[in-house]
Image (cartoon, rainbow, N blue to C red):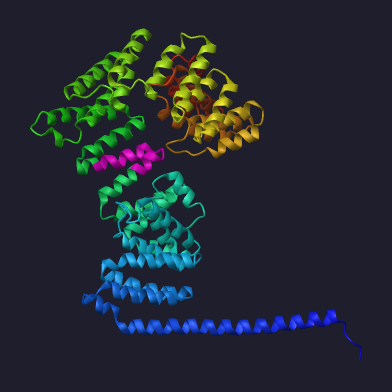
């Protein structure tokens, strides 16, 4: 028999040793695991025999009972064993609130030991809520910020299980993750829905949460359907109607909001509901109705303030000031506008208020000085701002610059705009106005510099996308520009009518008449809310151009009456627009 080389013998021997060692280790681990499970089972049986709930009710020292529970949890080696221990913690926490902190700490230990277990995450989230008394209006015992982060983390681990869908939604609401629509959209981007069987049960709070979730995801038709169910079945009918009105108000349907608020104000008689009704009417273009309500409320407020206890009047102070400002802003003539503004200044002086101590006061002074010549207006603004100690307020700074732009050479105006931007680096409204100004003066290189600066500051509003899209369209990259515009194509309260107008121009150039008409109609609907007394002549001319182009598309389809109505709306926006006048005259011939 031939002899094997020594090297081969060593390799075979080493392999045999590894096999034997692996078998011995596996047997030891199995025996150890069995012993661990056996120890936990014995400890669990012993604790149940200890009858902790009865001892809690008898007033026995919590420290001794918690010590037994802690020992039980130390014996736990699997998620199921941890859940068994946490079940005992929970039972005691429900009997005596002093155990809720121990319950929370034990649940957090289990969650740290098994970070991928959705069941333990659910228990840990519940323990956190329970330890805070079920309310998050105040601070968490461990700090509000930390508690919010923990709830959000637990919710993220539970998302994988559809059975936790409603609980996940509730946790995000408790954690405050739905305080901001953009944050809410990010949180729910992975997608989860409340189970239909839970919705079918008809519980009001489930319908409310499902409505909110659909609203966040832009499912307007689905949210509207849930809203109709809520209004029909809610115990708090007035509250449900207010929520419905705010939903339609925020989603570019002020007329529907006004209808709901009209019924609500008629039943409650609340000043707050009447004020909101007036706002909705104004947004829907029913300015005369809105002015009537503002006038009635202002008169009623003055009458109530003359009585013994004006402090109880919910319209007193800033509320009454806003009513007078709205009446001034919507006045048909400059003389009437001056009358209301003087009444506003007199009212604030009688109450000892500084003319510019809030946004209403600042806007009132700015509006009043616009009725003066440039030099007098600038002098009044500076004197009033100095008295109030707010010389560097962004609105005032911008207004002063706008007054002086017409008297400065072009090179100087560009430098002054950049100085304004640098004085208010974190103010997105200032950046948006500067972008509009540079675009209007066709200073496209300055627009690009401003957009780059806005990006470095973390600004990402729709105006940034719109200006980038316009730059691409000017460069001839129609497809890329259209892609950006379509990304900003959200017909809600924050939508910019220019986005839809530019999309319509693109569709029109491609002979996509139906798409162009839809885009122009959306732009025309948004123009009514975007152009007002403060709109510049250039802005009003551009808005009138939208109606002119829409009328031509309608006329090409033989819809002469609708075409004429579009032209009349355009003429109301810009009475001096010769193109609109000429087109209207041609239709009449």
**Nearer-the-camera pick, 562 or 145:** 145
Q: Which residues are magenta?
A: 246-264
**Nearer-the-camera pick, 298 or 436:** 436
Residue 119 drawn at (x, y percent): 45, 68
Residue 223 drawn at (x, y percent): 41, 50
**Is residue 330 visible from the viewing direction of this image?**
no
**Residue 343 falls inside the magenta stretch:** no
**Is residue 570 visible from the viewing direction of this image?**
yes
Residue 284 drawn at (x, y percent): 36, 33
Q: Residue furthest bottom?
A: 1
Q: Residue furthest left?
A: 308
**Occupied quadrant, residue 484:** top right
**Occupied quadrant, residue 111:** bottom left
Give the answer, above or below, for where 190 lies relative to 398: below
Residue 10 drawn at (x, y percent): 80, 81
**Residue 248 falls inside the magenta stretch:** yes
């Amino acid at each position: 028999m031939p002899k094997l080389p020594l090297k081969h013998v060593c390799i075979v021997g080493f392999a045999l040793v590894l096999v034997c060692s692996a078998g011995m280790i596996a047997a030891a681990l199995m025996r150890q695991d069995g012993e661990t499970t056996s120890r936990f089972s014995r400890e669990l049986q012993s604790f149940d025999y200890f009858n902790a709930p009865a001892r809690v009710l008898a007033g026995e020292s919590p420290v001794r009972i918690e010590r037994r529970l802690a020992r039980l949890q130390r014996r736990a080696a699997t998620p199921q064993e941890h859940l068994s221990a946490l079940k005992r913690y929970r039972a005691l926490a429900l009997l005596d609130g002093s155990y809720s902190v121990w319950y929370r700490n034990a649940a957090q230990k289990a969650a740290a030991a098994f970070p991928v277990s959705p069941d333990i995450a659910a228990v840990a989230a519940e323990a956190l809520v329970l330890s805070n008394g079920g309310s998050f209006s105040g601070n968490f015992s461990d700090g509000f910020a930390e508690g919010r982060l923990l709830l959000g983390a637990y919710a993220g681990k539970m998302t994988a299980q559809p059975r936790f869908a409603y609980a996940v939604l509730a946790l995000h609401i408790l954690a405050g993750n739905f305080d901001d629509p953009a944050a809410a959209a990010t949180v729910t981007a992975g997608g989860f829905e409340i189970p239909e069987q839970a919705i079918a049960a008809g519980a009001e709070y489930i319908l409310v949460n499902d409505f909110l979730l659909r609203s966040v995801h832009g499912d307007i038709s689905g949210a509207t359907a849930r809203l109709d169910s809520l209004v029909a079945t809610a115990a708090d009918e007035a509250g449900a109607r207010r929520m419905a009105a705010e939903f339609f108000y925020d989603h570019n349907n002020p007329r529907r909001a006004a209808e709901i608020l009209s019924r609500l104000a008629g039943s409650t008689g609340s000043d707050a509901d009447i004020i909101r009704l007036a706002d909705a009417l104004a947004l829907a273009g029913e300015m005369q109705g809105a002015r009537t309500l503002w006038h009635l409320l202002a008169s009623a407020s003055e009458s109530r303030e003359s009585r013994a206890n004006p402090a109880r009047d919910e319209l007193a102070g800033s509320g009454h000031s806003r009513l007078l400002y709205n009446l001034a802003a919507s006045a048909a003539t400059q003389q009437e506008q001056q009358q209301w503004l003087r009444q506003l200044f007199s009212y604030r002086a009688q109450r000892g208020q500084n003319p510019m101590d809030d946004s209403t006061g600042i806007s009132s002074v700015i509006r009043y000085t616009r009725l003066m010549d440039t030099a007098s207006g600038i002098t009044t603004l500076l004197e009033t701002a100095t008295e109030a100690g707010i010389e560097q307020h962004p609105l005032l700074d911008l207004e002063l610059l706008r007054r002086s732009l017409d008297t400065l050479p072009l090179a100087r105006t560009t430098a002054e705009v950049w100085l304004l931007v640098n004085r208010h680096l974190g103010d997105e409204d200032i950046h948006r106005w500067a972008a509009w100004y540079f675009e209007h003066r066709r200073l496209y290189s300055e627009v690009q510099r401003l957009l780059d600066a806005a990006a470095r500051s973390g600004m990402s509003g729709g105006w940034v996308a719109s200006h980038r899209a316009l730059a691409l369209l000017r460069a001839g990259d129609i497809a890329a520009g259209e892609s950006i515009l379509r990304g900003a194509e959200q017909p809600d309260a924050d939508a910019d009518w220019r986005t839809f107008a530019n999309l319509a121009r693109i569709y029109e150039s491609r002979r996509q008449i139906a798409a162009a008409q839809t885009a122009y109609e959306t732009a025309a609907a948004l123009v009514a809310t975007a152009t007002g007394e403060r709109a510049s002549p250039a802005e009003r001319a551009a808005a009138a151009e939208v109606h002119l182009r829409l009328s031509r598309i309608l006329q090409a389809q033989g819809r002469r009456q609708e075409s004429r109505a579009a032209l009349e709306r355009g003429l109301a926006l810009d009475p001096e627009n010769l193109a609109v006048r000429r087109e209207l005259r041609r239709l009449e011939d």
